[in-house]
């Protein structure tokens, strides 16, 4: 799974360099697919439940599962890129929300809080904790900052299957659910909305958007639970905000 995670991280590094005004989401997706293949992996998403692309690219009010197409990114957009790769039978899965040029202060803060919520969730991915300790850390940080947590979508276990048990909600009280053990691998993925938490699926059967049309952000990491603490397998959390290097 380390190799699968490394391929996903490399694909995100590429996406971070390519995200800019005027690039279509389809161009991004094709570049991501080529890069995964060049590294010896295969896209996890393409063909999964008939999904037609190698990545999910979701813009502004789109929460997750945006299908790449002719839409061109515009200055001020925020774009969620979700990438999965399989290598020798094991999957890696990660998402980043990138800024396209200069974004609004509202978008910037949403991205920062969502990223921080994921980091706090990862901190709870420790041997002996309960699963909902992760969920509670994410929810508490998000709602304290004034954002809502999408409740109808969750993180998940990951390994030889892209989606495995247990589900990892982004909300809930602490101290509930299975106790975390060394060797478990989880994909943690908070999705935070500026407005209400409700979402709906568009007629393309995949793209999930906020019901009120306000912005949403999404970050995800594949995390192994070890006796030495949480081990992130899918690289750093790029954002594209000012001053960040993708080197």
Image (tube, grey):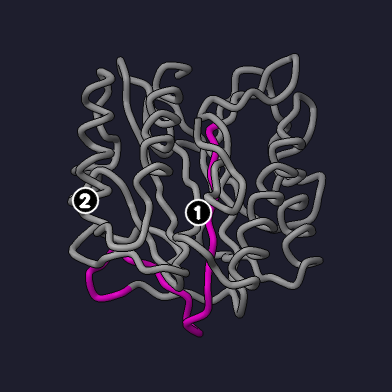
Q: Which residue is painted at 47% across and 45% down in the image?
A: 95
Between 22 and 13, the one lying in front of the other is 22
| Residue 226 sits above or below residue 197 on the image | above
Residue 185 within the magenta-colored segment of the rendering: no
Which numbered disc, 2 or 1, marks the residue closer to the eye? 2
Q: Residues within 10 Å of mark 2 (few under 14, many from 20)?
A: some
In which quarter of the view is residue 144 placed?
Answer: bottom right
Between 28 and 210, the one lying in front of the other is 28
Q: Which residue is painted at 52% across and 50% down in the image?
A: 240
Q: Position of residue 181 (x, y in %)?
A: 69, 23
Q: Is residue 123 left or right of residue 233?
A: right
Q: How many marks?
A: 2
Q: Which residue is painted at 39% across and 42% down in the image?
A: 17
| Residue 188 sits above or below residue 7 on the image | below
Q: Which residue is painted at 60% across and 18% down in the image?
A: 183
Q: Residues within 10 Å of mark 1 (few under 14, many from 20)?
A: many
For residue 97, the mark is 1
- Furthest-front residue in this view: 243
Residue 212 within the magenta-colored segment of the rendering: yes
Q: Position of residue 128 (x, y in %)?
A: 79, 27
In which quarter of the view is residue 75 placed?
Answer: bottom left
Between 149 and 34, the one lying in front of the other is 34
Helix or strand or loop: what does disc 2 sit on?
helix
| Residue 34 sits above or below residue 15 on the image | above
Helix or strand or loop: what does disc 1 sit on?
strand
- For the N terminus, the image quarter is top left
Q: Which residue is mark 2?
A: 27
In which quarter of the view is residue 48 placed?
Answer: top left
Q: Magenta residues: mostly which secondary structure?
A: loop
Q: Which region is colored magenta?
A: 202-222
């Amino acid at each position: 799974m380390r190799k699968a995670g490394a391929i996903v991280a490399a694909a995100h590094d590429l996406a971070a360099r390519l995200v800019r005004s005027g690039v279509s989401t389809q161009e991004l997706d094709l570049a991501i697919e080529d890069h995964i293949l060049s590294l010896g992996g295969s896209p996890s998403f393409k063909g999964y439940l008939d999904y037609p692309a190698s990545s999910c690219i979701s813009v502004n009010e789109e929460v997750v599962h945006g299908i790449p197409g002719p839409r061109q990114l515009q200055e001020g957009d925020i774009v969620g890129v979700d990438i999965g790769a399989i290598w020798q039978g094991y999957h890696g899965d990660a998402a980043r929300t990138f800024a396209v040029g200069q974004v609004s202060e509202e978008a910037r803060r949403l991205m920062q809080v969502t990223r921080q919520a994921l980091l706090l969730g990862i901190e709870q991915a420790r041997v002996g904790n309960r699963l909902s300790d992760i969920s509670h850390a994410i929810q508490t940080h998000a709602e304290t900052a004034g954002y809502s947590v999408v409740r109808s979508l969750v993180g998940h276990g990951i390994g030889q299957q892209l989606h495995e048990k247990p589900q990892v909600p982004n909300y809930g009280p602490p101290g509930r659910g299975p106790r975390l053990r060394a060797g478990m691998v989880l994909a943690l993925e908070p999705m935070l909305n500026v407005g209400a938490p409700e979402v709906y699926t568009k007629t393309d059967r995949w793209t999930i958007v906020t019901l009120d049309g306000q912005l949403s952000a999404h970050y995800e990491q594949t995390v192994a639970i070890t006796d030495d603490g949480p081990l992130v397998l899918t690289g750093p959390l790029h954002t594209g905000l000012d001053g960040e290097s993708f080197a």
